[in-house]
Image (cartoon, helix red, strand yellow):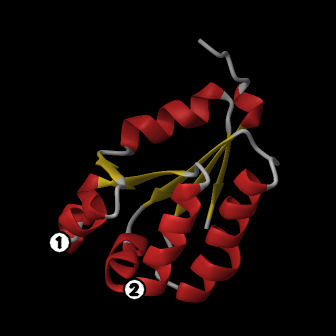
Amino acid sequence: MENKSKNDQLVVVWSSADKDVAISMVFMYTYNSKLKGWWDDVTLIIWGPSSKLLSEDKELQDYVKKAQDIGVKFQACRKCSDMYGVTEKLEALNIEVIFMGEPLTDYLKSGCKVITF
């Protein structure tokens, strides 16, 4: 089993309902981070209003697929997606939908880099 350094793991928490933030920051940075090898392991967490935005926006869904194709991992907060009624839509996009409080805490305590948008 490969032992990757937590210093090479990036976790991006996306909570904004602003599509411009999604395109010009969240997806641009996560995609390029993986594509260009800036980070070995890139995870994007969909949290709060971003889950509703993603469930309704085909262009953003296409960005998710493109990023998944190069190895960006996606997770979403189940509490949030249930609250917005979009859990099934996110799961249909091959996004892991789980209760995120404990996993986010683990990411923070593990020493990997976490940024929020």
Compared to residue 37, the image places residue 106 above or below, namely above
Q: In what element is the residue under mark 1?
A: loop
Which label number is shown at residue 65? none
Q: Residues within 10 Å of mark 2 (few under 14, many from 20)?
A: few
Q: Quadrant of residue 9?
A: top right
Residue at image position (43%, 75%) is: 61
Compared to residue 96, the image places residue 51 above or below, namely below
Residue at image position (68%, 30%) is: 111
Residue identified by numbered label 1: 85
> How many numbered marks does the figure carry?
2
Residues 66 and 106: in front is 66
Q: Position of residue 48 (x, y in %)?
A: 38, 67
| Horizontal side of residue 48 vs 45, given as left or right | left
Q: Position of residue 105 (x, y in %)?
A: 49, 36
Q: Position of residue 95 (x, y in %)?
A: 36, 55
Q: Earlier in the sequence, mark 2 or mark 1?
A: 2
Residues 6 and 110: in front is 6
Q: Amino acid at mark 1?
A: Gly
User: Split into 4 quadrants, where in the image is the C terminus?
Assistant: bottom right
Query: CA gap, disc 2 to disc 1?
Result: 15 Å
Residue identified by numbered label 2: 57
Q: Position of residue 92 (x, y in %)?
A: 26, 63
Q: Amino acid at mark 2?
A: Asp
Residues 23 and 111: in front is 23
